[in-house]
Image (tube, grey):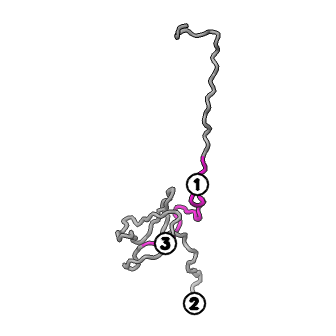
Amino acid sequence: MNATTTNPKKRSVPVKRKTRKSTIQPISYMRDPGQEHTFTVAEKVEAYCDHEINEDRTRDWLMGTIVQIDNKMVAVQFRTNVYLTEGWMVPDRILWFTFNSEHLRQLSGKRPKIEDEIPDY
């Protein structure tokens, strides 16, 4: 028989091939992926950073507003000049923090109560 001729009596049987089943491996995290604090844009927060108070530089908690949220980071904009740790002033007054940063916290609810009444003198 030639290599070019085929046997007409032989049927073609589909060949069963072993296929890999795609299994999704569980993702291991260092900590639970649930966030302790969820942030939203336009929310008021406090950040521990270098800033100016009465033209003096100090490192303390400063109130700012969240302007952008990324997958891993939060952008906070301030109304006063803020500085990097190297001493450079940040021109747009925006600092980026990670979600779990110890230098970022939600604004404490301790505000002075404003009285509606005008006292009599």
Circle 3 packing at 10 Å, graded few (<14), some (14-19), many (20+), is some
Q: Nearer the viewer, mark 1 or mark 3?
A: 1
Q: Is residue 28 above or below residue 55?
A: above
Query: Which numbered disc, 1 or 3, marks the residue that appears first in the sequence?
Result: 1
Real-space Cα separation, disc 1 to disc 3, in angstroms = 35 Å
Query: Which numbered disc, 2 or 1, marks the residue that appears first in the sequence?
Result: 1
* Residue pointed to by mark 1: 28
Q: Residue 23, how many percent across, how many down?
A: 61, 43
The three-letter code of the residue at mark 3 reads: Met
Residue at the image point whose x is 55% and y is 92% from the top? 121
Q: Which mark is residue 63?
A: 3
Q: Secondary structure at mark 3?
A: strand
The three-letter code of the residue at mark 1 reads: Ser
Residue at the image point whose x is 62% and y is 24% from the top? 15
Residue located farthest toward the top when viewing the structure as drawn: 1
Q: Nearer the viewer, mark 2 or mark 1?
A: 1
Real-space Cα separation, disc 2 to disc 1, in angstroms = 65 Å
Query: Which numbered disc, 3 or 2, marks the residue that appears first in the sequence?
Result: 3
Circle 2 packing at 10 Å, graded few (<14), some (14-19), many (20+), is few
Residue located farthest toward the bottom when viewing the structure as drawn: 121
Q: Secondary structure at mark 2?
A: loop
The one nearer the camera, 55 or 73, is 73
Residue 83 is left or right of residue 17, and the answer is left
Q: Nearer the viewer, mark 3 or mark 2?
A: 3
The three-letter code of the residue at mark 2 reads: Asp
* Residue pointed to by mark 2: 120
Q: Residue 13, how many percent across, how many down?
A: 64, 19
Q: Residue 27, how many percent across, how many down?
A: 58, 52
Residue located farthest toward the left when viewing the structure as drawn: 88
Q: Which residues are magenta?
A: 25-49
